[in-house]
């Protein structure tokens, strides 16, 4: 279990580095496009398409890492006043619902990516194939599913330990 947890951690960190690179490329591309457009009257063709792809990489590369760090935004004004066991039940319910939704997104994303690959769907201007980016979504959501499973196992281990005390 520890080896799997470490492998998942390294995968999440690797994806986070890819996301950071995507952010850097997106900023650079946008800056060069703005300079080219307003100073030289020569914008970069396909900047909008490339930015769309980079945003997808940015979001889905950080989604699993953010969950592993427990850094997703949550509002718990009401829940924080509940007793510990009720908070645990709410957390487990929330994680199960999120896991189901992420698993559905992963599954349907894989189906869609395979369809796009078969049809040869590509971006309009640059003709970049779309399916690799949808597969990236699948990987990001898959890592998120694994993080949710890991969290759920942690909840159950925590509740077993608290029952022994």
Image: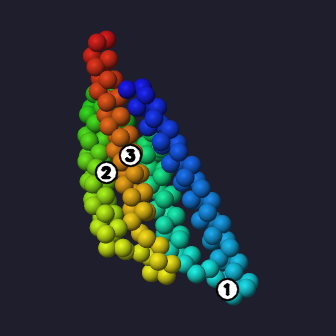
- The residue labelled by disc 2 is 102
Q: Residue at x 43, y 71 (%)?
A: 129
Are discs 3 and 1 less than 8 Å apart at CB? no
Closer to us: 65 or 161: 65
Position of residue 78 in the picture relative to residue 8 (left or right): left
- Against 110, residue 68 (above or below) is above
- Against 143, residue 137 (above or below) is below
Q: Secondary structure at mark 3?
A: helix
Disc 2: CA contacts within 10 A as few (<14), some (14-19) or many (>=20): many
Cα distance in 3D space between marks 1 and 2: 41 Å
- The residue labelled by disc 3 is 144
- Against 125, residue 161 (above or below) is above
Q: Secondary structure at mark 1?
A: loop
Q: Secondary structure at mark 2?
A: helix
Image x and y of residue 78, in percent: 34, 41
Are discs 2 and 3 less than 8 Å apart at CB? yes
Image x and y of residue 27, in percent: 63, 65
């Amino acid at each position: 279990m520890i080896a799997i947890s470490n492998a998942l951690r390294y995968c999440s960190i690797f994806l986070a580095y890819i996301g950071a690179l995507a952010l850097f490329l997106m900023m650079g591309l946008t800056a060069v496009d703005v300079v080219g457009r307003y100073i030289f009257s020569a914008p970069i063709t396909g900047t909008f398409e490339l930015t769309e792809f980079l945003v997808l990489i940015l979001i889905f590369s950080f989604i699993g890492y953010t969950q592993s760090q427990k850094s997703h935004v949550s509002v718990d004004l009401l829940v924080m006043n509940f007793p510990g066991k009720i908070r645990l039940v709410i957390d487990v319910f929330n994680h199960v619902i999120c896991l189901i939704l992420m698993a559905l997104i992963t599954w349907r994303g894989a189906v869609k990516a395979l369809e796009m690959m078969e049809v040869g769907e590509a971006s309009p201007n640059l003709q970049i194939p779309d399916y690799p980016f949808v597969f990236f979504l699948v990987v990001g959501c898959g890592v998120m599913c694994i993080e949710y499973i890991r969290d759920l196992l942690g909840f159950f281990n925590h509740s077993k330990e608290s029952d022994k005390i």
